[in-house]
Amino acid sequence: MGDSLAHEAELNGLVKEYLKFAAFEETVNVFVKECKSKGKAIPKPPMIADHDIKTSYIQEDLLQAFEDGNRKVFFKLWEQHISPQVREDEQLPQKLEFYLHVHFAIFPLKNSGKSVIYKKNKDKEDMDERILHFKNYLETRGAALSQTTEFLPFYALPFVPNPTVHPSFKELFQDSWSPELKMRLQIFLSAGLKVTKAPKLLSLFKENGQSSKELLQQLQQQLVETERKAATYMKRYSKMQEDYQSLIGVTAELVDSLEATVNGKMITPEYLQSVCVRLFSNQMRQNVAQSIDFTRPGTASSMLRASIVPTTKSKDVPLLPSLDYEKLKNDLIYGNDRLKALLLQALRWRLTQSHPGEQRDTVLQAYISNDLLECHKSQRSLINLLNSKSEIVRQYTARLINGFASLSLGRTYLTQSTVLLKILEEALETEEEDSITRENVLGALQKLSLRRALQSAMVRDNIIFWLLSVLEDSDSLSDYTLEYSIALFMNLCLRTQGKRKCAEDARRVLKVLSDLLGHENHEIRPYVNGALYSILAIPSIREEAKAMGMEEILWCFIKEGNTEMNRQLEFIIKQLNSEEVFEESDSDDEEEED
């Protein structure tokens, strides 16, 4: 009973505290009066003496520590006198605290008159300590702002050797930056130190609400969904561009017919081929130009028109400043999962969001020359991050590798790793179906399959049969997984070894490919046709195809108005009815640039 009375008195105090905080003055009076009449106790609140005087002294001490660059004194006072609830729950104090950490991190650089080289060892030690403290803040309390565009550049500050010349931090070293920050601090302290402490009842209510961890997970899910929608919109935009280009191609063919009628001259295909090879040999490799069939209607005219399209002069793009790669690699190995994810994302953006040309080439060359992924060290290779327990670390690692694989020089770099292919193939098996990580691993493998050596290794590792098992349930796949799976399958079928693998289970292969011919995603048709044409070079597969009525199936897909697709299907039918004997040769296994 006594316990209940004690708790009852405490609860009465909490109710009175909240009513006073919410300015329910009449209700407070009624509540107090009724408690007295019923003999209910209300504990008195603790007395706060000389509050205004103390507030003034605290404010002066904080501003003085700010001016002196005394980080330890400042944040000790800050944590003592600014309530955790204000610092953690309100956005304005969070942003102000972030900039205060930046201020103390760069204080020696702004006040020593030296940018990077320090004459005194203690100055260098002080700067290192400040940067380390700022880095720890970014990984802990400052991590909450990592998704905010305003603060994102500052997460690279600890890794930039000379921030005074970095364009992203130019504003920090202007004379007006520190005084403006001090003014913001002064305004906040004038208001913040006098704010009535939030009632305990309100705090208890908030603690039972949604935790910051749950909120962060929700935001991450929204980010993933937004990225998926963006990819869908980009695909639709690309389709519109292709339709526009098709219309231009039709117009070009009509003009070609008019020109031939007016001139009344016969031009041999060999002559046209030789002229076009000479025209375009400067724009592409000679062997590529010679391999293009310029005698096909529209090809020559389309390339001629494209060659005279005026190109707008690009603005001078500055090169990005260098990074401390040893420190980066060390943090990617020994840092916590959140730090690893942020660094992997920043490194990918630095590559993919750089301007094509000299800036992107310089970024890629720097990554390669510093062996960013440690491709030459199988045990310490950062490619092993694909085996991390953290899903977000695996995802961002796969995205970065896919970014490397999108560039020819990046593929050359990745092929130097002895563990790359094995780890990528294991990720295909272990990752969840249609996860972003598996999509990026699949995309990287498809791009790496342009390299003959890796192509051969994938065939030996039975990737063809893994792809078959995925493509058998094509309706459940995302567009990305479907397109990259069939594209990789076609690349592997171009090899002699790949055709032989398909012959081991010819009926299953032909069944999957014939089903894909009727898929609603028409983007995959060229890859399906290419794979069919390639494997039908094997006599045993041709016999199996004839037995299952493949020719009748192919004729069903020949429709009016789709000249190019009809032409491909006619070539496949011709290959199906061919009597040529397949040459058992592995001459195509020689290394070739993609």
Image (cartoon, rainbow, N blue to C red):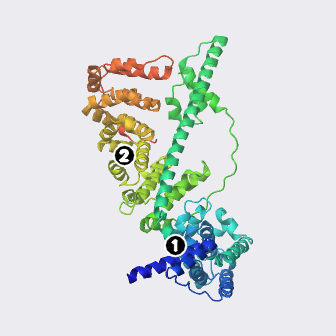
Depth order, front residue of 420/387: 387
**Which of pointers 2 and 1 indicates the residue nearer the eye?**
1
> What residue occupies the far front of the structure in this picture?
37
The quadrant where residue 184 appears: bottom right
Label 1, secondary structure: give it. helix
Q: Is residue 171 placed above or below 259 in the rendered structure?
A: below
Tag 1: Cα neighbours inside 10 Å, few (<14), some, or many (≥20)? some
- Residue 499, x across and y down, in percent: 31, 33
Give the amino acid type for the residue marked by disc 1 in the picture: Leu
Q: Residue at x 69, y 79 (%)?
A: 111
In the picture of the structure, the residue carrying the numbered disc 1 is 201
Residue 102's spot in the image, x, y percent? 62, 72
**x and y percentages locating residue 445 in the rendered image:** 40, 45
Residue density around tag 2, few if under 14, some if 14–19, many if 20 or more, within 10 Å:
some
Does residue 500 appear in the picture of this structure? Answer: yes
Q: Is residue 290 above or below residue 143?
A: above
Residue 539 vertical position relative to residue 477 in the rendered view, above or below: above
Residue in view at x 25 percent, y 32 percent: 505
Q: Are marks 2 and 1 in contact (CB under 8 Å)?
A: no
Label 2 sits on residue: 433
Of 479 and 327, the residue lying toward us = 479
Instruction: Give the alpha-carbon distance from disc 2 to disc 1, as whole Å.
Output: 47 Å
Q: Is residue 370 visible?
A: no
Residue drawn at point x = 35 percent, y = 29 percent: 513
